[in-house]
Amino acid sequence: MSTMDVRRNEENTNVASTGQFTAEKDGNQESSKSSVSSKPSKIRSFMRLYFKENKKFTFSKKKNKELRPSNPSEAALQSDPQKASAEEDKEYINKEENAPNMDLASSTSPMGSTGLDSLYVKKRDLKKSFFKGGKKKKDPSAKSIFNPQHRSQSNGSENQTRNTTVNNINPAEEGRKVVSQKKKMGSNARKYSSNSVKIGNVEVGPSSFEKVFLLGKGGVGRVYLVREKKTTRFFAMKVLNKQEMIKRNKIKRAFAEQEILATSNHPFIVTLYHSFQSDEYLYLCMEYCMGGEFFRALQRRPGRCLAEHEAKFYIAEVTAALEYLHLMGFIYRDLKPENILLHESGHIMLSDFDLSKQSGSIGSPTVIQARNSSPSSQSTYALDTKSCIANFRTNSFVGTEEYIAPEVIKGCGHTSAVDWWTLGILFYEMLYATTPFKGKNRNMTFSNILHREVVFPEYSNAPSISSLCKSLIRKLLLKDENDRLGSQAGASDVKLHPFFKNVQWALLRHTEPPIIPRLAPTDESGNPNIAHLKESKSLDITSSAQNSQTVEVPLSNLKDQEDDPFLSFNSVTVHHDWD
Ligand SMILES: Nc1ncnc2c1ncn2[C@@H]1O[C@H](COP(=O)(O)OP(=O)(O)OP(=O)(O)O)[C@@H](O)[C@H]1O
């Protein structure tokens, strides 16, 4: 098994014939791998074709991702991981548990647990399940002040940013809570972009959709391929369990993800269409990325890696996406192949923003003279995205083990420079099918990250990589964040590296990607062949609650508390130019 296997498969989750997930540990990695490519791949093929026709997109599995430091110092590598202090990191000391099985239209949550003890790393699940939509259920319509029933609480502005979601309280009380929540948000409340997206009252609820199948699952939720009943359009629906979020202290993460998705409008960042909530769940209805995870695509390549010119394409697109995020005041913090989805066209779409960090206030971008433009030649000017987020430091310990930046391990605070570090790791992994600092265990990996210089394999049939490419990777992987490429002018530093000399940045999305997702066969009428879907195990959304276990704390109790943690979750529908 390759080193990559080990990293990806610390925990695998299989789709059992019942449609339920069962957790497996390392011993069963191979078997779980094979099931990944069985029925879901057929459905994926169908969906590829379907979405080709409908301008949409794929799916995949789950992974590990987060870890906590042994201590906010290098010495901490040997110390107790549970001692980290940052409030938002408390979640990491919890055991990893299976996300509950969920019914989009149900308020009952069956809870399950893999029973795995994982204090450091959020494990990766490599399985998917697929379900078929079933009977209609009574619509527990999304609760929002955008909801007509609550409209009196809204000022009606399309660009209102903090549209408080409330439930089961009287209007006077509701108004008071909205006001107090707005106060809490303070002046840092971000405004939605209004240039090409329009944010409005949420127009759907859980029962507007039917499940098609499970795309993947994370710590507190699941992502389903769903079909909107009214339009028959497909979406990826992330369903987050409130109870689990409370238990794992992940509320802020869900809010951050909604915020980033709703405010972002970029071709390489997954699009949000709706966000809403029910008593038990938060819902993020996103564009379905039909090409699946870039991670999977990489695994299917010979040697599980890409040629330099192919990797260059993806690294360029990721750079453009990071540039945009930084410009918006966000640090991504979790770049890795699993979080890069592929559009059916093969272009990348960054997803999974729950580890991202929003800067409280964002600076204005400035224009600077490019570093490598010689005084004699005509000056090159570049956008300085670093200035948007330069003063923003955060101290939580998040990331994926092999992708974590030295300054994060040291616990001395980190900036957007961590994204350039992860870009270097990603680039290396694309070329060599392994990450550069991987050690025998986590402490060795961290030690390598802190002390070892990046080494490029020299064995006889090692990939042949140009010195310019190596130079770029080395500069991205400089231990000192102040020396690292990207530390002066952000993305411009990276884009102006000579390795990218022939890249037409403005034309990236019109460049043909190296990997084009394959299309499914059609039936005699030329329609996607969906016959095999009937063979799939399906889950009637109205019956999924039958297996429910009791939730520990009735969420309805929260409704009586002034500090309902989900009060300010934005329930919105986002209209895009192309809708
Ligand atoms: N828009 C999408 N289109 C297709 N597949 C998606 C989409 N969003 C997520 N997925 C798939 O669903 C899986 C789970 O998604 P995601 O990682 O966002 O969930 P999560 O609950 O945030 O996980 P985590 O707890 O790791 O943050 C991923 O493996 C991904 O492949």
Image (tube, rainbow, N blue to C red):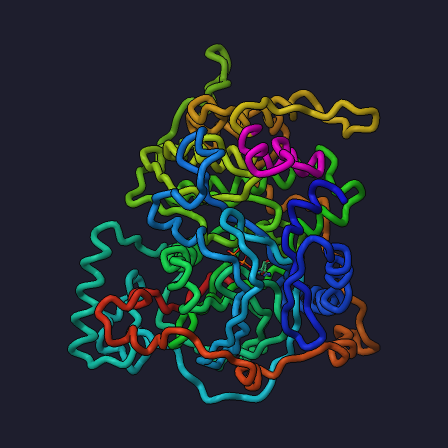
Based on the displayed image, in which of its 4 quarters is residue 522 positioned? bottom right
Q: Which residues are magenta?
A: 425-448
> Image check: 173 left or right of 521?
left
Residue 473: x and y, percent?
60, 27
Question: Is residue 295 found inside the magenta-colored segment of the image?
Answer: no
Could you tell me if residue 2 is visible in this image? Answer: yes
- Please report the residue visible at 40 percent of the width from the left and 41 percent of the height from the top: 327
**Displayed-image quarter of ligand 1:** bottom right
Q: In this rendering, is residue 166 above or below 36?
A: below
> Image check: 186 left or right of 99?
left
- Please report the residue visible at 43 percent of the width from the left and 56 percent of the height from the top: 257
Residue 111: x and y, percent?
51, 72
Name the residue at the top extreme: 376
> Image check: 405 left or right of 523?
left
Q: In this rendering, is residue 255 above or below 67?
A: below
Q: Quadrant of the N terminus?
A: top right
Q: In this rendering, is residue 360 above or below 12?
A: above
Residue 364: x and y, percent?
32, 37
Q: In this rendering, is residue 271 above or below 214?
A: above
Q: Main secondary structure of the magenta part?
A: helix
Out of 343 and 446, give the one closest to the viewer: 446
Based on the displayed image, in which of its 4 quarters is residue 456 positioned? top right
Could you tell me if residue 579 is visible in this image? Answer: no
Residue 110: x and y, percent?
51, 76
- Please report the residue visible at 49 percent of the width from the left and 67 percent of the height from the top: 285
> Image check: 109 left or right of 36?
left
